[in-house]
Image (tube, helix red, strand yellow):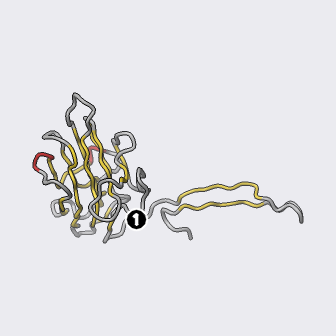
Amino acid sequence: GPNSNTAYTVSVRAVCGADDTSFATTASFRTACGPMSVPFFEDFDSYANGYFPPCWQRLRAYGTDPSVNAQYHHSGSQAMFLLSYMDTNLFCTPSAVPLNGNEIQVSYFANMIRGDQNTWLQAGVMTDPTDVSSFIMLDSINYSSASYGFNEREFNTSTLDASASYYVAWMFYGNYNQWSYYFSTGAIDDISI
């Protein structure tokens, strides 16, 4: 059968006689995303600049951000770029990770590129990728306390219901220099679950 999260093109050919075998129509589609398997690793290097990976969820985006960007990255050539101007960005992994009685460990690299004391990045999980209020914070970085450059961060799900499934998620908020046109920015790279 078809693979999950794969683009396909289907062509239908009509045979109306010996000399007429033209294509009647062509359609393209992408199959649904499959379940996320652990271990999972994402470095965003396989995506084009400005792209948002298929199957990932993006809620409360600022324009087209978060999106993949080549300017700031920990390793390789790309990272997920976060941009905020007095608003919140939220994005989460492609599908829920079932804990099945176990806890999971999540590590990632975060870079608080520009901001002030009102700029923060939170990492955690969501039970519903369409409901911002289901976000449970498990790690937090404030711009004023962050070291320059990418810093390795990690959290685990030991405090959560081990019989449930969760989407791993990041929430970014910036209120940097609200009286001018500066934006708070950050980046996430090399996610391991």
Counting from the top left corner in percent of width and height, residue 86 is at: 25, 35
* Residue located farthest toward the front when viewing the structure as drawn: 71
Where on the picture, by quarter, is residue 116? top left
Counting from the top left corner in percent of width and height, residue 18 is at: 89, 65
For the residue pair 166 and 153, the one nearer the viewer reads as: 153
Residue visible at 27% across and 56% down in the picture: 188
Q: Which residue in the structure is indicated by mark 1?
A: 35
Where on the picture, by quarter, is residue 168? bottom left
From the viewer's perspective, tell me whether residue 92 is left or right of residue 24: left
* Residue located farthest toward the right when viewing the structure as drawn: 18
Where on the picture, by quarter, is residue 77? bottom left
For the residue pair 134 and 121, the one nearer the viewer reads as: 121
| 56 up-or-down from 119: above or below | below
| 64 up-or-down from 94: above or below | above
Residue visible at 61% across and 56% down in the picture: 28
* Residue located farthest toward the top when viewing the structure as drawn: 179
Q: Secondary structure at mark 1?
A: loop
Residue visible at 38% across and 58% down in the picture: 94
Counting from the top left corner in percent of width and height, residue 84 is at: 28, 40
* Number of residues whose C-alpha sits closer than 10 Å to that of mark 1, classed few (under 14), some (14–19) or many (20 or more): few
Q: Amino acid at mark 1?
A: Pro
Counting from the top left corner in percent of width and height, residue 152 is at: 18, 62
Quadrant of the snapshot with the N terminus: bottom right
Residue visible at 33% across and 63% down in the picture: 43
From the viewer's perspective, tell me whether residue 23 is left or right of residue 76: right
From the viewer's perspective, tell me whether residue 3 is left or right of residue 151: right
Quadrant of the snapshot with the C terminus: bottom left
Q: How many marks?
A: 1
